[in-house]
Amino acid sequence: MVGLVKPPASRIRDTLIIACSELGAAPDCLSFGDAERFLVLQHLAASMPSYQECENDERLSLEEVARLFDQHQFQHLIVCGHLGCGVIPYWLRPIKSGADDTNGFRRRFENGTLRLVDNHYTPKSLSERRELLIFEHVLCQIENLLTHPFLEQRVRSGKTSMYGWVVDDESARIYGYRAEESAFVLI
């Protein structure tokens, strides 16, 4: 995280943030670097399809993200969720007959994040379950992104570092994922 916190020597755009479209301008307001260094790409619940999903469905693509990496040579990639996310609770509601699952967002959530939380955790309340879903959804999106060869190669070679963040909408504090602790911690 040191390279991310240290302001770059120039105003080169070196960090891509993939954030929930509900989060608004919050990802642009980071205090540890010049705003010009961040490019924010907002998607519904920061949902990213895996490489296999893109190969099997011509409507899905990460070509825009790959193009941005070619253009900016990002050193950092942050997948950013937030505790006030309204999308994930929406996906927990039963589907209405005839409802469209645009680009398979709900299906991806159900097959990944929801299945993982329901099979590996025993939350004590609905609010704890919702928080677990939000945190785990960020990690599932990182896993999906790492299936794409253009990004997996950059991360493996050390050219790009990846981070999982969850913003507490009420306090503006950020929880960052620490792999060595297998946990999200306040940063």
Image: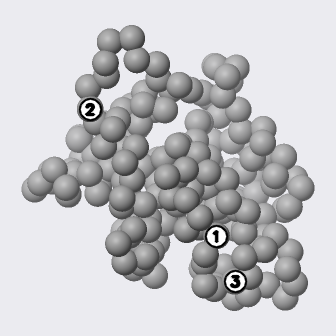
Is residue 7 visible in the rendered image? The answer is yes
Amino acid type of the residue tagged 2 in the rendering? Arg
Q: Is residue 121 left or right of residue 124?
A: right
Which quadrant, please, contains the N terminus?
bottom right
Q: Judge whether 51 appears above or below 156 on screen.
A: above
User: For the view shown, which residue lies furthest in the front direction?
Assistant: 24
Q: Earlier in the sequence, mark 1 or mark 3?
A: 1
Kindly report the distance in space between the C-alpha atoms of the residues bearing marks 2 and 1: 31 Å
The residue identified by callout 1 is: 28
> At 60% across and 78% down in the image, what residue appears?
30
The residue identified by callout 3 is: 33
> At 69% across and 41% down in the image, what residue appears?
148
Q: Secondary structure at mark 2?
A: loop
Q: How many marks?
A: 3
Q: Nearer the viewer, residue 54 or 34?
A: 34
Q: Nearer the viewer, residue 179 or 8?
A: 8
Is residue 181 visible in the rendered image? The answer is no
Amino acid type of the residue tagged 1 in the rendering? Asp
The residue identified by callout 2 is: 93
Q: Judge whether 138 appears above or below 157 on screen.
A: above
Q: Nearer the viewer, residue 51 or 86?
A: 86
Quarter of image, res 90: top left
Q: Earlier in the sequence, mark 2 or mark 3?
A: 3
Kindly report the distance in space between the C-alpha atoms of the residues bearing marks 1 and 3: 10 Å
Q: Judge whether 104 appears above or below 13 on screen.
A: above
Q: Residues within 10 Å of mark 2 (few under 14, many from 20)?
A: few
Q: Secondary structure at mark 3?
A: loop
Q: Is residue 97 left or right of residue 44?
A: left
Q: Nearer the viewer, mark 1 or mark 3?
A: 1
Q: Judge whether 131 appears above or below 177 on screen.
A: above
